[in-house]
Structure formats: structure tokens, C-alpha cells
Amino acid sequence: MRRFTKALTGLAALCIVLSFTASESAENRTPNNSDETADVVIVGAGVSGEMAALELKAQNPNIKLVLLEKQATTGGSLRYSSGYIGTSSKLSRKSFNTNTVDDVLAFLDNCIGKENVNHAFVRRLYDLSEYVTDNFITWGVDFDGANATRAQDPHQERWTREGRQLWYYMPAGRTNAIANVLEDQLKKQKVDLRLNARVTDLIIADGKVLSVKVQTKDKSYTINTKAVLLATGGFSSKGDLVKKMTAGMYKNVPTGPNPYASNPGATGDIFGLVEKLGVPTIGTGVMAYAGSLGGGSIPSRFYVNQDGKRYMDEYSWGYNITFQTQKNTTNCYRLLDTTVLNGQSAGAKASVAAKVKAGTVTKYNSIDELAKGLSINAAQLKQTIAAYNAAVDAGQSPEFGLPAGKATPIKDGPFYAEQIAYTTAGSLVSIKTDDNARVVTGNLQPVRGLYASGECAISNQFWGGLYAGSGFGVGSSAYNGVLAARTIVSDLK
Ligand SMILES: Cc1cc2nc3c(=O)[nH]c(=O)nc-3n(C[C@H](O)[C@H](O)[C@H](O)COP(=O)(O)OP(=O)(O)OC[C@H]3O[C@@H](n4cnc5c(N)ncnc54)[C@H](O)[C@@H]3O)c2cc1C
């Protein structure tokens, strides 16, 4: 009888499979029965989950795989990004711009400190870069456009003063081109992709994953499985988590809805999903960029902290400005005087006027008034301004190597001040995995059948709260997805 019931269930499942038609949406392909089985379930169809799915199919075309995505579209943050850091590939063999894995490591060491980088894991990931980029090219991504690669920072003069250069791979159509190609590949490889399907829980017994619970608009169901890959991304769209995870580190991290156009799916679901397992949360901070509360910034190369002190070369590359500002434990401000403002283009002047009107830039008649208004140490501020102006007047670089010709002296009022705030592109807090993408508990024991990749595992690569710069999210998430897939295939043997 039991065998008969099983056969009937199998037949029912077959009928459901056969009844899918090409015109049906991915959403409609969710099963009507409450329980089903799969070899592998992937949670999240961002670049990491998609690359993992494609790699699993490449390794074993017959694998029973379900890819669940809570949003109505694939791609996650990939669709908001512009390019990525990769290493030698067909692309780089065609052109002159190549990075080696050692270049990537040296860059990270230089930017965020050797002690904050897991060299073995980063090497393992970037060793997969050529494979991933070559696949992108084979699948139709065009890296041969005029701006296909560019220096990680476009201001090469600044860059060469500060350290190593990395090349940044930017396809024609930016990373949306990659997202579209990945979606096509999922279809070609017949990956069972289910959109609008949120994973709400993991069922684990005796340290082993048994199943996932899925919620759609109108039903919930369970998938029993041997392996679950969590590729749920970060939490940059969840202000309260951003605040919690950056507490005590940065000033002025926006805590409301992300002011940066961002992936609404980045809500940190990973933490809830593994909460009961005792999986450590590691890292701190967000992929932040020093901007302003109103967007953009005033044309100033004079930045001070609350102590009235400058703290860096204001003509350095964007992420250095960001790091140095983040290291302050006080608010930091850009200051501008009227003579410098008057020398700007009409557009720049209009932008400052608009910021004053919007209240994100404040205008003061004197330095004393400015210092009082912003609670900056006035005596120190005046001393800092005097030293800066004197150096520039003498044709010398003020402290920290700011070129004299790029300085913006603070002499004539009214004066303008803008507080520095951060835009948030991603998160730098994740859960702990081993260097093969297996999720581990506090005693570093793998949870059997549970894996994580991409931004929800990013702090296994680097930590410390400083982001090395645009490009370290997309590439490494893709490589991590491939690595996770290979580990799963090997563990399932
Ligand atoms: C505005 C912006 C600009 C950026 N610019 C760059 C750049 O130029 N270069 C760069 O390298 N990086 C950039 N990044 C970062 C980079 O895009 C990400 O780090 C990377 O794409 C993360 O990929 P992922 O697959 O790990 O996560 P995501 O892309 O976040 O994908 C995770 C997916 O999981 C889904 N999901 C989450 N929880 C669940 C659940 N419970 N059930 C089902 N599905 C779930 C989400 O909806 C999402 O689609 C940027 C990010 C943003 C937001």
C-alpha cells in the first residue's frame, strides 16, 4: 500500500512537471503539494546563487536543484552595480589590462591592512575568476567596449601616488548585461527557478539540514533536501541592521531607507535563518562611500573633524577619503570659502546654493560662527586653517600630501560647511563559513548540508569595517558561488 501511495505521489509529481509550459511564469511553477524533495536548494538568485546553480548544473546536469528568490526578478544587487574585480581571463588576454591574484591581495593589504584579510580564502576565490569571466564571455557578455576595463580609480595620478592599481572589469551595459546573461543561462540549463518564493526557515536536526520552508504569495511548502546554499546577500536596505552592525564605528551612517538606489532584497535574512544554530556573525561595517546627506558634495579639499583637525589628503581617491573619514570617531565636515566657490562653474555654484536651501549645507559669516554652530574646537580650527593657507600661499603642499595646486584655501567668508555622511552599497558583516563555503558553528564545526556564499559570507574574505573599493562585491560573490557549488558536489558524493 505504502509503495502504491509512493508511486501515486511520484506520478502526481510527474504530472505537475509535465504540465509546466514554456509560457508559464517561474512563479507559477511552484508545486501545489506541500512537500517535495531536491538534492540542493539555493536561497537567493543574485550573482552568487545564480553562479552556484549554473556550476551545479555544469558539474551534474541531472542534479535536482531548486533556486528560490523572494523578489520578482533575478540578479539582486548585480543589477545595481557597474563592474567587478577579476583576474586574467580571455578578456585580459585580448587587452593589456590584467590583474593577478597577487595584485588583488596586495591591493587589499594596502587598503585595509594585511591583518584584516584571509589570504588563503581570497586566493581560493580569485583563482576562480578566470573561469567565471570566461564563462561570462562565452555566454555573451561583451567586455570589448571602449570602457571595458578601467583603473580601479579613474584618477591615475592620485592612484600612482598611493599604491597599486587594479583593473576593474565593466561590461558593455554594465552588470545588468551579466544579470541578463545569467538569467538566460538559467533558462537554457533548465534550472528550476522560483521567483517570489521566500525561504522563511531551515529545518535542522542533529547538526544536519533537512529541509527549507518556502512562502509564496498564496501558499507555503517545504522542500526536503540534502544541501542548502544560502546566497541571500547583505542588509544594506535595512536601516536598523545597518545601524546595529556599524554601531560605534562610523558617524552618520544613514539609518532610514537606503538613500542609495539599492537592492530592496538586501534585508539580512541570513541572520534570522541561522539564528538558532549558533553560527557566528563576523565582521563589521558596510560598503560605504563618503558622500553627504543630500547626495554629491561641495567642491572642497579642506576636511576637518570635530577637533578642528584635518586628517588626510583630500585629493586622494574616493575610498581613501572614505577610510580616513570612517576612522574618525567624531563627525567630519567639508569646508568651503566664497572665493573658491566663486571660481567654480555655474552648475557647481547652483548645486551649492541648492544644498544651502535644502539645509544640507550651512552658510556661516565667520569661522567663529561656523565653529560654534558645528561644535568644532574653534582655536584648533583656526590654527589648522592658518597652517593650510600658509602652505598653499608658499606653493607648498599642506600636511598629508595634498598637492598645493589642488587645495581650496579657507580665507573669505561667508563660509560653507557640509557634514560627511555615507552612502551604503552593501554590507561587510556576514556569517562564518570555512574556506570551502561550509557554514560553521562557534566551535568551527560545519553544519552538515549548509553552505553560504556571496555577500552574506563576505567577511570571511576581509573584515575590519573598511571596504577596499567598488568591485569587490560582484566578482567575489560569483567566485564564492562556484566554490560553494563545487564543495556541495564533493560533499554529496
Ligand atoms: C547600489 C549598489 C551598487 C553596487 N556597486 C557595485 C559595483 O560596482 N561593483 C561591485 O563589485 N559590487 C557592487 N555592489 C555590491 C554587489 O552588487 C554585491 O555585493 C553582490 O552583487 C552580492 O551578490 P549576492 O548574490 O551575494 O547577493 P544579492 O545580489 O543581494 O542577492 C541575494 C538575493 O537573495 C534574495 N533573498 C534574500 N533573502 C531571501 C530569502 N529569505 N528567500 C529567498 N530569496 C532571498 C534577494 O532578494 C537577492 O535577490 C553594489 C551594490 C549596490 C546595492
Image (cartoon, grey):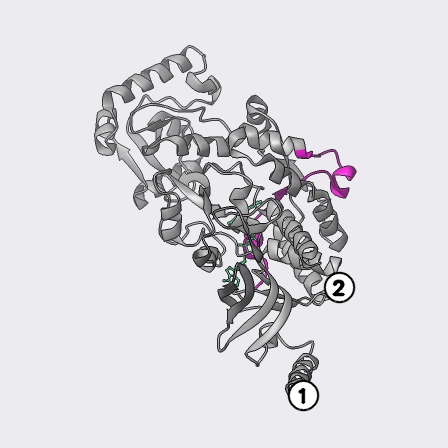
When the figure is inspected, residue 472 is found, relative to residue 114, above or below; the finding is below
Q: Residue at (37%, 23%) from the top-left corner?
A: 310
Q: Which residues are magenta?
A: 73-101
Q: Residue at (37%, 17%) from the top-left corner?
A: 388
Question: Looking at the rendering, in which quadrant would you find the C terminus?
Answer: bottom right
Q: Which mark is residue 61?
A: 2
The tally of labels here is 2
Decide if residue 181 is in sight here: no
Image position, residue 216 (x, y; %): 50, 73
Q: Nearer the viewer, mark 2 or mark 1?
A: 1
Judging depth in this view, the residue of 277 and 44 nearest the camera is: 277
Q: Quick one: label 1, few (<14), some, or many (20+) residues within 10 Å?
A: few
Instruction: Say which residue label 1 marks.
Output: 4
Judging depth in this view, the residue of 419 and 413 nearest the camera is: 419
- Element assignment for label 2: loop
The kind of residue tagged 1 is: Phe
Q: Earlier in the sequence, mark 2 or mark 1?
A: 1
Decide if residue 39 is in sight here: yes
Q: Is residue 471 left or right of residue 371?
A: right
When the figure is inspected, residue 288 is found, relative to residue 201, above or below; the finding is above
Image position, residue 441 (x, y; %): 50, 50
- Element assignment for label 1: helix
